[in-house]
Image (cartoon, helix red, strand yellow):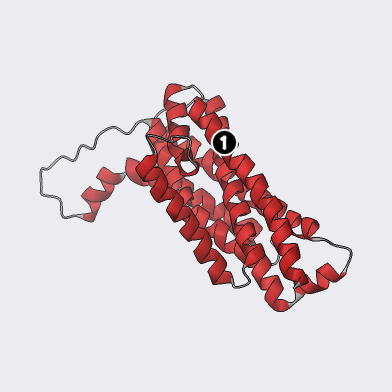
């Protein structure tokens, strides 16, 4: 499927652009403002220095917004389109159970999006190091590994809803709504539950700044992975139940 819609090519390219766009724009913002015009003559624009960790955080922010949207759209369509076209029914007539069907979808999406986000964040690291200052290679690798747990969680969440709901846009809407509710909960209670799902990016930036892995970050990663496994197991059961109706 990835070869047919060329997502194996365009997804990494889009993720690279998302990851490097904000750091580069932030660095050249004074030059952009001067060339665009509208700045009084003689006015010198001096923006505060952006630490390398905060510049890297800009990349995480873009991927957490637009990258996750792409993840949800493509993951939801991988099941809903096959249901509407009847492909899933033909596959399940053969000796293929829900575990194999959903598991193959999950693995394919994880390989695609983890690979794309890793490449994008490596490009971000290069430009951040070039423009803003050095970041520890070891902790950057850890940051990329930890951040990809968020993609695993979103893929698992989307597949769980896709196993229950047949309409593509309904799957996308419910998934986005769930993540939005999680973000609201995190914004209200993040001081009390700093290890909550949606607090992964700030915890990663704190790790890059302090060069230590906090207990909250370990708890966050553990929560994401355990929940992801639980969602996948639930999706196996729900998909099998719905297809038998």
Q: Residue at x 71, y 68 (%)?
A: 242
Q: Residue at x 42, y 36 (%)?
A: 202
Q: Residue at x 64, y 51 (%)?
A: 231
In the rendered image, the vertical position of residue 202 relative to residue 17, given as above or below? above
In the rendered image, the vertical position of residue 41 relative to residue 72, given as above or below? above
Q: Secondary structure at mark 1?
A: helix
In the picture, measured across the screen, residue 10 lies left or right of residue 245, that is left
How many discs appear?
A: 1
Q: Quadrant of the C terminus?
A: bottom right
Look at the image and tell me whether residue 21 can be seen.
no
- Please name the residue that numbered disc 1 is placed on: 221
In the rendered image, the vertical position of residue 235 relative to residue 83, given as above or below? above
Front one among 146 and 242: 242
Q: Residue at x 57, y 38 (%)?
A: 223
Q: Position of residue 34 (x, y in %)?
A: 21, 48
Look at the image and tell me whether residue 201 can be seen.
yes
Q: Quadrant of the N terminus?
A: bottom right
Q: Position of residue 19 (x, y in %)?
A: 47, 46
In the rendered image, the vertical position of residue 159 relative to residue 77, given as above or below? above
In the picture, measured across the screen, residue 10 lies left or right of residue 181, that is right
In the picture, measured across the screen, residue 104 lies left or right of residue 46, that is right
Residue 157 in which image quadrant: bottom right
């Amino acid at each position: 499927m990835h070869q047919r819609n060329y997502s194996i090519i365009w997804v990494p390219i889009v993720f690279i652009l998302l990851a490097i766009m904000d750091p580069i724009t932030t660095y050249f913002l004074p030059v952009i403002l001067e060339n665009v015009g509208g700045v009084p003559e003689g006015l010198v624009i001096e923006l505060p220095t952006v630490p390398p960790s905060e510049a890297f955080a800009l990349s995480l922010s873009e991927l957490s917004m637009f990258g996750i949207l792409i993840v949800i759209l493509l993951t939801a369509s991988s099941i809903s389109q096959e249901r509407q076209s009847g492909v899933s029914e033909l596959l399940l007539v053969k000796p293929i159970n829900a575990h194999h069907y959903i598991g193959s979808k999950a693995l394919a999406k994880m390989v695609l999006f983890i690979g794309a986000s890793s490449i994008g964040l490596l490009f971000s690291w290069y430009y951040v190091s070039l423009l803003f200052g050095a970041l520890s290679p070891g902790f950057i690798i850890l940051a990329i590994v930890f951040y990809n747990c968020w993609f695993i969680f979103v893929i698992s969440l989307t597949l769980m809803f896709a196993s229950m709901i047949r309409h593509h846009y309904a799957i996308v809407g419910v998934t986005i709504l769930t993540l939005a509710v999680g973000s609201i909960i995190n914004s209200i209670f993040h001081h009390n539950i700093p290890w909550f799902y949606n607090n992964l990016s700030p915890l990663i930036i704190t790790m890059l700044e302090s060069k230590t892995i906090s207990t909250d970050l370990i708890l966050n990663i553990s929560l994401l992975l355990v929940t992801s496994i639980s969602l996948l197991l639930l999706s196996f059961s729900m998909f099998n139940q719905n297809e038998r109706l």
